[in-house]
């Protein structure tokens, strides 16, 4: 019997194909990944309650009908222009910016009419603006 030690060859592990596969996978994932833009603005939305809240006496209410005509505290304005609406709000609020202003628009009102009312309030610096809505099947209060 021959008990001599045989010289063993050094085993080399060739990593080149493994690195090639890893780079191919990396390129595949980089190309096929879609990036989603996240909103930069964090908004905390208010919660609504079903309870009726008593409104102060000095509330200004802008009602807008389906044709886009404005009514300030029940009185129809002469025209639908921004400067007319702004002057009427300024006169009724007596320059007090903290007077509550409620916009009550019909569901079929043109969007531009609501935006114009909000713009008039913003130009006057009104601090308390809200939009009146109704819950399903109920008439607005």
Image (cartoon, rainbow, N blue to C red):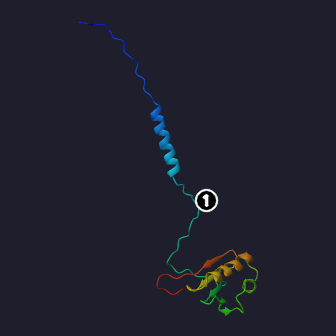
Residue holding disc 1: 40
Residue 121: quadrant of the picture = bottom right
Query: Among all residues in the image, which is located at the extreme left?
Result: 1
Give the mark count: 1
- Considering depth in this image, is 104 or 50 the residue closer to the camera? 104
Q: Residue at x 55, y 81 (%)?
A: 133
* Image x and y of residue 8, in percent: 37, 15
Q: Quadrant of residue 55?
A: bottom right
Task: Name the residue located 56 percent from the left edge and 86 percent from the top edge.
Answer: 108
Q: Is residue 55 depicted above or below 13 in this figure? A: below
The answer, for residue 76, to whether it is visible in the render is: yes
The percent coordinates of residue 81 (x first, y second) are 72, 86
Say if 127 sits above or below 136 in the image.
above
Residue 72 seen from this side: no
Q: Please determine whether, in this image, residue 138 is positioned above or below residue 15.
A: below
Q: Quadrant of residue 118?
A: bottom right
Find residue 66 and report its horizontal and vertical position in percent: 59, 89
Position in image of residue 141 (x %, y %) = 55, 86
Tell me which residue sits at (54%, 57%) in the image: 36
Quadrant where the N terminus sits is: top left
Secondary structure at badge 1 equals: loop
> Crowdedness of circle 1 by 10 Å Cα count: few (<14), some, many (20+)?
few
For this rendering, which residue is in front, 90 or 38? 38
In this rendered view, identify the residue nearer to me: 29 or 134.
Answer: 29
């Amino acid at each position: 019997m021959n008990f001599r030690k045989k010289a063993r060859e050094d085993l080399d592990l060739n990593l080149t194909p493994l690195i090639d596969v890893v780079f191919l996978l990396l390129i595949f994932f980089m190309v096929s990944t879609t990036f989603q833009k996240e909103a930069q603005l964090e908004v905390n939305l208010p919660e609504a309650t079903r309870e009726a809240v008593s409104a102060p006496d000095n509330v200004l209410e802008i009602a807008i009908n389906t044709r886009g005509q404005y009514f300030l505290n029940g009185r129809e304005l002469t025209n639908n222009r921004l400067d007319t609406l702004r002057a009427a709000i300024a006169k009724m609020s007596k320059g007090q910016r903290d007077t509550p202003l409620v916009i009550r628009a019909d569901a079929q009102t043109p969007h531009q009419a609501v935006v114009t009312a909000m713009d008039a309030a913003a130009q006057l610096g009104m601090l308390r603006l809200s939009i009146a809505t109704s819950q399903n099947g109920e008439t607005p209060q």
